[in-house]
Amino acid sequence: MDIQKYENYQEKKNHFDTSFPYNTYLCCIPQDFLSVPLHWHEEMEIIYIKKGRGYVSLDLSSSPVQEGDIIFAAPGQLHGISQYPSVRMEYENILFDLSMLESKNRDICTTDFFAPLKQSHALEKNIYTPDDKKYAKISYWIDQADSICRTSPLPHAAQLAIKGYLFALFYELFSDWNIKASSKMPLPSLEKLKMILKYVENHFQERITIQDMASCCDYSQSHFMKYFKNAMGMSFIDYLNDYRLTMAAKLLLASDSTVLSVSQEAGFENLSYFNRCFKKKYGQTPSAYRKAVRT
């Protein structure tokens, strides 16, 4: 199994054809995976916590979340999900391209709201809890969209309903906020970090050295190592190994490949080193992990 295809599988599982870029799917931590590494993409993402609790990282800040919370990750915004120790968390992921709501004629909705959001990666508020005054209406419009998606087969006109619900949702988000006045461009250092994380996402199966990454950033090796440690709170090698272990854990559950094959597909060159790292992170051997989670 190609681990890159597996990693992208859920985001490509469309309820509509490719001309309607709106996807929704359910996930569970730790049954599906223990964490989603810090990453970014051009789609808007909504994370709707259905049961349990965990952590969501936005840019470089981690926040606890629990049942009922709704999290918005803007296009281009760094985000990740991790487990609260020994607690199961079920959540819904909704991904969609803001271009589906934009007008080709560049109307006010596009120029004053969606275009600035895509350029700045900024939202006035990212996490809404049931105590927030806007929560009832925000959750209502998401629930309405979910209700349509549960219909099988989906009527073609459902696309009209989904768009309508999304417009109503953004009205609630922006009704008392001037996004153009509030927006600020991402810090150059954060943009550099996004480039590094995207490189790891695309090349983790290959051999990656500090020299490679320093050259990619146009930094000296010492400056790159200091920059990454300050930004992420860990060394680049520790981050790379952790990312590869996360991918390996996913592949162990998604395939019947041997542990050796999984380790190689995840970018590890030495099986014994992979086994040591895996046991340190997950508390058990790869084989034991696969058996425990599957049963």
Image (spheres, rainbow, N blue to C red):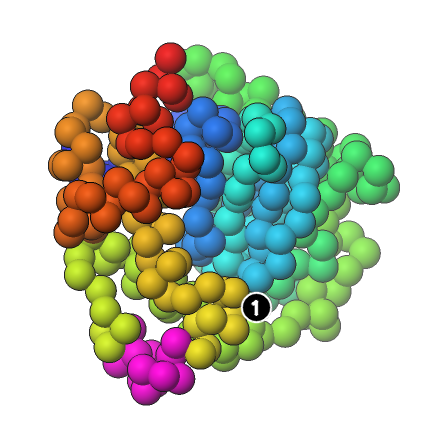
x then y, percent, for residue 51: 64, 24
Q: Nearer the viewer, residue 17 or 245?
A: 245
Report the residue at 59% width, 35% height from top. 85
Residue visible at 26% across and 40% down?
Answer: 275
**Residue drawn at (15%, 51%) of the image:** 269
Q: Position of residue 24 (x, y in %)?
A: 47, 31
Q: Is residue 168 visible?
A: no
Q: Is residue 205 left or right of residue 220?
A: left
The reply to whether the magenta stretch includes residue 119 is: no
Q: Is residue 3 above or below residue 198?
A: above
Q: Position of residue 147 (x, y in %)?
A: 58, 20
Quadrant location of residue 195?
bottom left
Q: Is residue 4 left or right of residue 289?
A: left
Q: Nearer the viewer, residue 192 or 178?
A: 192
Against 150, residue 53 (above or below) is below
Q: Determine if residue 220 is in view.
A: yes
Residue drawn where x is 79% and y is 34% of the image: 130
**Residue marked by disc 1:** 120
Q: Majority secondary structure of the magenta segment?
A: helix
User: In which quadrant of the rendered image does the C terminus lie?
Assistant: top left
Please state which amino acid type lies under the numbered disc 1.
Ser
Where on the picture, by quarter, is residue 41?
bottom left
**Residue 217 within the segment the image draws in magenta:** yes
Q: Is residue 293 above or below residue 9?
A: above
Q: Which residues are magenta?
A: 213-225
Q: Quadrant of the N terminus?
A: top left
